[in-house]
């Protein structure tokens, strides 16, 4: 009986264009395309910002000031040649220059007296990606090093010992994390962050359609009076929602791999090529397996919510807060320093996200991973049992 | 024989406000409950066509839904052939066919697929099911459209498929909630003839209607329900006689008695 219900529900779902869009097309095309486009756009914008020619104004400096010659040497810096107003900052506001460096008038005296000279750097970083500060700081750092070396040599220090005086201790970082571990840690949270909401999205529409939708269209009653048991009904519908949700996740993973390959090959983006080379198909399959019981829980939950709703619209309203139930633990799992342990293993959603992170790092503790998987499975079975109980209640099925 | 003994059904009202509003207009409201059916006793003889008459909101649909097992009575019991339904719900469900106010069929499936689905749910084997569907397609004149999607159907076509769905598994009793409402003359005639055919085959039919000509044409037994209670139970002829030969007057008088 379950297979009869399941086959019919799937047939109806496949014939519904809206479901196909949410279940397959969205995860397959739109999201990865959107993320890919964003990645390309962001990378292009940052690169462009770092290499674009900056127009500048320097005030208070004499011709001898090293910053004048240093800035003039740079091919990607251009001195502003226009009229100079009293309010030089207005040139930044009107986009005529990128920065204004105001040198201390006392610079020569300060240097002679071994005093610190303070310069003001004006720029506009409202966009958040203005590179003027970073690029000028680099130039000033070079001048600082040169000036310090000159002063130390003048004080009689041997040129070879200068680095020992300037930086008595230098910390040399040796990160022993393998590339896979490092990438897995960074990407693990992100993969879960993309996949789990897609699972939810893939489950919501079919659940609304085959529960609240059936109520609204008046087909539920014909189904309730057949000899099939409520468990048959719930299982048939649950399997349909689960399949839709799983297809969403699978489509997302497939497209993630596909689009990563396309971007890596076609656009020669280093980071994507690195990801494709580091994360194997086995890891992604394991990640998908880890999600199975969570997808089951989500499917059972959305089915319970949907059958409680009076109609399609109410069901959709009820589903909105459900996103928080997914996103909050997902964000928690993405926090730096949060690792899978025995406490986190029992926190729904977070545990799966953390487990996926561990799998992609290639470091998962088998017992811990199995605990996460089985605890989610227990939750899924409990939710299916609740859905069956819920489907037996007249006050739920015929709620007015 | 299909018997309903002391059936009661109440619905919990949403809130006190709804209770207060309804309480002023409907005597069936008491506290936070709406008493939809009160002590319903109905005995239907096998193979007869039974009409349920009453005004809108009288309780006919609730009664039919209880009979179909879509709703559960709060008290009382339903018996089929002397056996309580609660003892073997599956047997009872296989013994009845129900057509609710809506067609209860799936818009994205064809008429044929709808019938096949419900046939499988009733446990019919593939070959027997196909034979039965073809038989009904012919009887209800559905050949031209049965393989088209249900959402493309006219009201009459939908109702024909819905009736076919209700009788697909060859039940002993067929329960129909206003089966001819909204149909054109031709579709209505096909359905009334089909009910007559059921009667000839010895299938019992219980149906609600507002059309007294249908009652006169088809029924032996009539129940008039008002405000959740049976006001009249008996033979059609008896009811006609009470209205001095006028069925309309007679039914109306039972409705006015409780008004």
Image (cartoon, coloured by chain):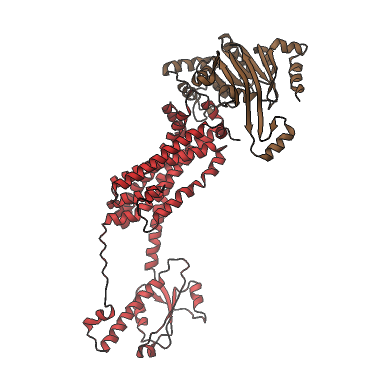
| Residue A190 makes an appearance in the image | yes
Q: Position of residue A153 (x, y in %)?
A: 26, 86
Chain B is which colour?
brown
> For the C terminus of chain B, which image quadrant?
top right
Work out whether B180 lies above or below A327.
Answer: above
| Residue B194 makes an appearance in the image | no
State the image quarter where residue A251 is shown. Answer: top left
Residue depicted at 72% across the width and 10% down the height:
B238
Disc count in the image?
A: 0
Chain drawn in red: A
Residue A351 or residue B197, whichever sits in front: A351
Residue B194 or residue A68, whichever sits in front: B194
> For the N terminus of chain B, which image quadrant?
top right
Q: Position of residue B183 (x, y in %)?
A: 63, 22
Work out whether A84 lies above or below A385.
Answer: below
Q: Position of residue B91 (x, y in %)?
A: 49, 18
Q: Position of residue B98 (x, y in %)?
A: 56, 21
Work out whether A375 lies above or below B171.
Answer: below
**For this view, does A302 lie left or right of residue B49?**
left
Work out whether A165 lies above or below B154.
Answer: below
């Amino acid at each position: 009986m379950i297979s009869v219900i399941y086959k019919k529900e799937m047939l109806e779902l496949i014939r519904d264009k809206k479901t196909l869009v949410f279940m397959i097309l969205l995860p397959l095309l739109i999201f990865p395309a959107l993320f890919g486009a964003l990645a390309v756009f962001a990378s292009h914008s940052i690169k462009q910002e770092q290499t674009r020619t900056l127009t500048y104004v320097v005030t208070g400096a004499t011709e001898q000031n090293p910053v004048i010659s240093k800035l003039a040497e740079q091919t990607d810096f251009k001195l502003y040649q226009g009229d100079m107003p009293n309010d030089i900052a207005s040139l930044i506001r009107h986009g005529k220059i990128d920065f204004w460096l105001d040198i201390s008038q006392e610079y020569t005296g300060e240097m002679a007296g071994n005093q610190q000279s303070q310069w003001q750097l004006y720029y506009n970083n409202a966009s958040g990606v203005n590179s003027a500060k970073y690029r000028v700081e680099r130039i000033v750092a070079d001048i600082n090093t040169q000036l310090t070396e000159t002063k130390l040599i003048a004080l009689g220090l041997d040129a070879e010992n200068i680095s020992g005086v300037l930086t008595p201790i230098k910390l040399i970082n040796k990160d022993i994390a393998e590339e896979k571990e490092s990438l897995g840690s960074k990407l693990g949270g992100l993969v879960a962050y993309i996949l789990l909401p897609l699972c939810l999205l893939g489950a919501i529409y079919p659940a609304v359609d085959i529960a609240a939708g059936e109520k609204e269209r008046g087909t539920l009653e014909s189904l309730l009076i057949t000899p099939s048991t409520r468990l048959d009904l719930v299982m048939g519908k649950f399997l349909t929602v689960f399949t839709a949700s799983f297809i969403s996740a699978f489509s997302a993973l497939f497209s993630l791999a596909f689009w990563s390959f396309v971007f890596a090959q076609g656009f020669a983006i280093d980071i994507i090529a690195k990801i494709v080379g580091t994360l194997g198909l086995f890891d992604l399959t394991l990640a998908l397996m880890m999600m199975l019981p969570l997808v089951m829980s989500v499917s059972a939950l959305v089915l319970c919510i949907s059958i409680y709703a009076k109609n399609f619209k109410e069901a959709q309203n009820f589903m909105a807060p459900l996103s928080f139930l997914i996103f909050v633990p997902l964000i928690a799992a993405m926090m730096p320093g949060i690792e899978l342990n025995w406490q986190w293993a029992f926190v729904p959603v977070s545990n799966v996200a953390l487990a996926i992170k561990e799998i992609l790092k290639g470091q998962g503790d088998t017992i811990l991973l199995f605990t996460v998987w089985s605890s989610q499975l227990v939750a899924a079975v409990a939710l299916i049992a609740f859905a069956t109980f819920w489907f037996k209640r007249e006050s739920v099925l015929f709620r007015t | 024989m299909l018997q309903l003994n002391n059936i009661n059904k109440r619905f919990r009202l949403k809130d006190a406000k709804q209770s207060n509003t309804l309480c002023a207009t409907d005597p069936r409201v008491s506290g936070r409950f709406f008493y939809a059916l009160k002590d319903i006793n109905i005995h239907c003889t096998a193979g007869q066509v039974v009409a349920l008459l009453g005004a809108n909101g009288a309780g006919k649909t609730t009664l039919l839904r209880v009979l179909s097992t879509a709703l559960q009575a709060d008290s009382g019991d339903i018996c089929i052939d002397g056996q309580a339904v609660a003892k073997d719900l599956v047997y009872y469900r296989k013994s009845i066919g129900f057509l609710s106010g809506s067609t209860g069929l799936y818009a994205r499936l064809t008429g044929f697929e709808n019938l096949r689905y419900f046939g499988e749910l009733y446990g019919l084997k593939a070959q027997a099911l196909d034979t039965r569907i073809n038989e009904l397609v012919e009887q209800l004149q559905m050949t031209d459209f049965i393989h088209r999607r249900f959402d493309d159907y006219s009201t009459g076509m939908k109702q024909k498929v819905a009736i076919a769905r209700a009788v697909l598994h060859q039940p002993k009793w067929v329960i129909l909630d206003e089966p001819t409402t909204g149909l054109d003359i031709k579709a209505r005639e096909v359905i009334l003839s089909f009910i007559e055919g059921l009667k000839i085959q010895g299938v019992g039919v219980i149906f609600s209607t507002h059309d007294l000509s249908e009652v006169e044409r088809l029924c032996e037994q009539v129940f008039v329900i008002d405000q959740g209670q049976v006001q009249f139970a008996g033979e059609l002829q008896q009811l006609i006689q009470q209205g001095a030969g006028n069925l309309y007057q007679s039914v109306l008088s039972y409705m006015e008695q409780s008004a």
